[in-house]
Image (cartoon, rainbow, N blue to C red):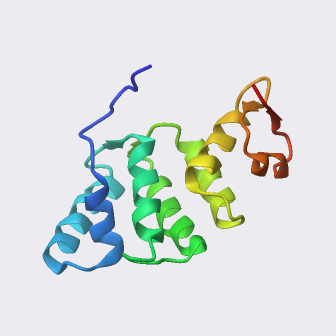
């Protein structure tokens, strides 16, 4: 099902420039963009895959190697902005907590968070890491 966009979409690279400060001009421009969002002058949209991509890039040992808790904290700050509309926003925030407090990858953390929103709380998977999360019922096909 397609999501409903509330405003222009933002790509991962804009968020990364703001977080990493590795290009002053782009960081400055990205900061100005998100200041408009924070003030309520602009609504930005992003699919949850933009956040997943940011987690991947920020955590990469070959790129930025940010600690998991720092990734959670900085991305959650973006997600708390009322005018930053992200698909499955609450599940993404929950997934960032799971990711920061465990050894699972962000994709699995998001799957757990989304599954916890369902009636059955069931995941079909061979991955036994899902068994470690309270409330999740892992089943094998």
Write the residue at 25% across / 80% down: 22
Viewer can see residue 21: yes
Where residue 120 sits, quadrant-wise, is: top right
43 vs 84, left or right, is left
Location of the N terminus (image quadrant): top left
Above or below: residue 102 compared with residue 44: below
Above or below: residue 19 compared with residue 35: below
From the top left corner, tell me how far across and down residue 25 is, in percent. Answer: 13, 75
Write the residue at 26% across / 56% down: 36
Location of the C terminus (image quadrant): top right
From the top left corner, tell me how far across and down residue 112 is, in percent. Answer: 69, 43
141 vs 89, left or right, is right
10 vs 82, left or right, is left
Write the residue at 71% across / 66% down: 101
Where residue 24 sits, quadrant-wise, is: bottom left
Q: How many marks?
A: 0
64 or 51, nearer to the observer: 64
């Amino acid at each position: 099902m397609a999501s409903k966009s509330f405003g222009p979409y933002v790509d991962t690279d804009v968020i990364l420039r703001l977080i990493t400060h590795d290009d002053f001009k782009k960081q400055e421009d990205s900061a100005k963009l998100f200041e408009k969002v924070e003030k309520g002058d602009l609504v930005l949209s992003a699919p949850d895959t933009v956040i997943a991509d940011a987690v991947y890039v920020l955590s990469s040992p070959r790129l930025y190697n940010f600690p998991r808790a720092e990734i959670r904290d900085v991305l959650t700050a973006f997600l708390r902005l009322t005018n930053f509309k992200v698909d499955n926003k609450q599940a993404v925030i929950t997934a960032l907590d799971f990711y920061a407090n465990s050894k699972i990858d962000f994709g699995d953390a998001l799957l757990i968070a989304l599954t916890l929103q369902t009636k059955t709380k069931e995941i079909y998977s061979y991955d036994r890491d899902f068994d470690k999360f309270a409330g999740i019922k892992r089943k094998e096909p």
